C-alpha cells in the first residue's frame, strides 16, 4: 500500500484530529498553521474552559444540527461523544459533564485540551509548519501539494480544516473557502451563527451592562416560536448577548426577509397567578409609595424604569391606586419582556460560521472532495453547523478524524 504524504491546512480542532489520526495510520503528515501556536481558537471556547463535546447519543447531536445533519451520520457514528471523551481522558484530560450534557475538562482549562492534542500529533510524528498556506497545488486534476511561505510542499493528499470566518484574530479568515472555490467547489455564502443580536430600538441601550440569570428566552420568526431556553443573558449597547442569546441566534437565519423578536420571561419560576399574588404582597408593603418605587424587591434597579415605561402605568401613581387591568399589563411585561431584533453582529464576533463548502460536493463516508482527487475537508469549513452545547466541536473531532483516516488509508479518494 502506498504511504500517503498528507498536508493538513489548519491547526484547530478538526486539523489536529485529522493530522494525528492520519499519522497514526502510517501517513507522512505536515500540519500547516498560520499562528505561532496550534489550537488558538480552542483556547477561547467555552469562556476559556472548552466545552469539548456533549455527553449524549449520536442522534441527539444530529438533532442539534440545523444545517445538513444527514451528512454527518457516518463521521459521528464512527467517533461519537463517548469515544471523544475516552480519547481525551486517555490522554490525561479528566472530564466532567455539566448542565445540558456539556462536557468540560475537570480543570476548567481549555489549555489542557490543546496540550493533549499537541502531544498527540507530536507523538505520531506530525511535522508542524508555521506558515500560512497560500495555495493548493494540483496536477492533472489531482492534488500534488501546497504552497506555504513561498515554498512548495509536495503532498498526495490535502485536508482543508481552516475553520470558518468567525474570530479572524484566531486565524479563521475564510482561506478555506478561497481554496475550495479555486478548485471548483461551491461555497455557500458564510454568515454568522452563535452571535450577539442587534436590537431594533433603544430599550437595550438603556439596560446596557445588565446581566440576567435564570430567565427564559423565547425567539419568534414571523410570530412562530423557533426557540425557547432557560439560562443567562446580557444587555449591551447594541442589543443582547450571553449564552441564551447565542443559542437563539442559530435559529434566526433570514434577516431582511423575515421578522424576529424575543420575549424574555423575567420570572419563569412563577406562573401568572402566583406572580400576581407576589405583586399584591409587594404593593401592600409599599401601599403609600409611588408605583416606580414599589418594584425594588422584584426587579434589578436598572430594569425598573424600562418595565414601568413599557407597562404604561404612570410611575408616580400611588401603588394602592394601581388597577387589576394595569397589574395585568405589568405581568404581561414581566412574563414576556419584548426585544425586537434587527439583525446579528458581524461575522467576526460570531462563535461559528454557517455556510461553507457545499456538502453535496463532499463524500460523507470519507470527507473526500467529489471534484478533486486527493482533496478532503473537515470541520467548520464545511456547510454544517450546530447549536451551542459542545456540538460544533463534536463535529470538528468526528469529521477531522474521518478525513485523516480516509486520506491515510484509501487508495482512491474519488
Image: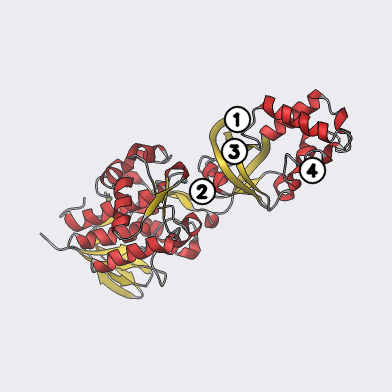
Label 1 or label 2, whichever lies nearer to me, is 2
Residue 217, label in figure: 3
* Among numbered discs 3 and 2, the one appearing first in the sequence: 2
Q: Nearer the viewer, residue 326 or 106?
A: 106
Residue indicated by mark 2: 194
* Among numbered discs 3 and 1, the one appearing first in the sequence: 3
x%, y% of residue 165?
Answer: 47, 57
User: Is disc 3 in contact with disc 1, using a CB cutoff of under 8 Å?
Assistant: no
Please tell me which residue is depicted at 33% across the width and 62% down the height of the picture.
Answer: 117
Is 365 located above or below residue 14 in the figure?
above
Residue indicated by mark 1: 223
Is 90 located above or below residue 219 in the figure?
below
Label 2 or label 4, whichever lies nearer to me, is 4
User: Is disc 1 in contact with disc 4, using a CB cutoff of under 8 Å?
Assistant: no
x%, y% of residue 25?
Answer: 18, 59
Graded by Cα atoms within 10 Å as few (under 14), some (14 to 19) or many (20 or more), the crowding at tag 4 reads some
Is 332 located above or below residue 74 in the figure?
above
Is 334 located above or below residue 300 in the figure?
above
Q: Is disc 2 placed on a helix, strand or loop? A: loop
Cα separation between marks 3 and 4: 21 Å
User: Is disc 2 in contact with disc 4, using a CB cutoff of under 8 Å?
Assistant: no
Residue indicated by mark 4: 305
* Among numbered discs 3 and 4, the one appearing first in the sequence: 3
Amino acid at each position: 500500500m502506498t504511504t500517503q504524504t498528507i498536508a493538513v491546512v489548519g491547526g484547530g480542532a478538526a486539523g489536529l484530529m485529522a493530522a494525528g489520526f492520519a499519522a497514526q495510520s502510517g501517513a507522512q503528515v505536515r500540519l500547516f498553521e498560520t499562528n505561532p501556536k496550534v489550537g488558538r481558537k480552542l483556547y477561547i471556547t467555552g469562556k476559556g474552559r472548552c466545552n469539548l463535546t456533549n455527553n449524549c447519543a449520536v442522534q441527539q447531536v444530529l438533532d442539534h444540527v440545523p444545517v445538513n445533519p444527514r451528512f454527518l451520520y457516518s463521521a459521528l457514528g464512527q467517533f461519537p461523544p463517548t469515544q471523544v471523551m475516552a480519547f481525551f481522558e486517555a490522554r490525561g484530560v479528566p472530564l466532567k459533564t455539566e448542565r445540558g450534557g456539556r462536557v468540560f475538562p475537570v480543570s476548567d482549562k481549555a489549555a489542557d485540551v490543546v496540550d493533549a492534542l499537541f502531544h498527540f500529533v507530536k507523538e505520531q510524528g506530525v511535522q508542524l509548519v508555521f506558515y500560512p498556506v497560500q495555495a493548493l497545488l494540483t496536477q492533472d486534476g489531482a492534488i500534488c501539494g501546497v504552497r506555504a511561505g513561498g515554498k512548495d510542499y509536495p503532498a498526495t493528499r490535502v485536508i482543508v480544516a481552516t475553520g470558518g470566518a468567525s474570530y479572524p484574530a484566531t486565524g479563521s479568515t475564510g482561506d478555506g473557502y478561497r481554496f475550495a472555490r479555486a478548485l471548483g467547489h461551491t461555497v455557500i455564502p458564510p454568515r454568522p451563527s452563535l452571535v450577539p443580536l442587534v436590537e431594533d430600538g433603544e430599550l437595550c441601550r438603556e439596560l446596557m451592562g445588565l446581566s440576567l440569570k435564570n430567565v427564559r428566552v423565547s425567539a419568534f420568526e414571523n410570530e412562530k416560536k423557533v426557540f425557547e431556553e432557560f439560562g443567562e443573558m446580557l444587555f449591551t449597547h447594541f442589543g443582547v448577548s450571553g449564552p441564551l442569546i447565542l443559542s437563539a441566534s442559530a435559529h434566526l437565519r433570514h434577516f431582511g426577509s423575515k421578522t424576529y423578536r424575543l420575549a424574555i420571561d423575567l420570572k419563569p419560576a412563577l406562573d401568572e397567578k402566583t406572580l400576581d399574588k407576589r405583586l399584591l404582597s409587594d404593593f401592600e408593603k409599599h401601599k403609600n409609595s409611588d408605583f416606580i418605587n414599589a418594584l425594588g424587591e422584584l426587579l434589578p434597579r436598572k430594569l425598573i424604569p424600562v418595565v414601568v415605561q413599557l407597562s404604561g402605568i404612570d410611575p408616580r401613581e400611588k401603588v394602592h391606586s394601581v388597577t387589576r387591568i394595569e397589574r395585568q399589563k405589568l405581568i404581561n411585561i414581566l412574563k414576556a419582556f419584548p426585544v425586537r431584533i434587527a439583525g446579528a453582529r458581524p461575522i467576526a464576533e460570531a462563535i461559528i460560521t454557517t455556510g461553507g463548502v457545499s456538502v453535496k460536493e463532499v463524500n460523507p463516508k470519507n470527507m473526500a472532495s467529489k471534484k478533486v482527487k486527493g482533496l478532503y475537508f473537515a470541520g467548520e469549513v464545511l456547510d454544517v453547523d450546530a447549536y451551542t452545547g459542545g456540538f460544533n466541536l463534536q463535529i470538528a473531532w468526528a469529521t477531522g478524524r474521518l478525513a485523516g483516516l480516509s486520506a491515510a488509508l484509501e487508495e482512491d479518494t474519488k
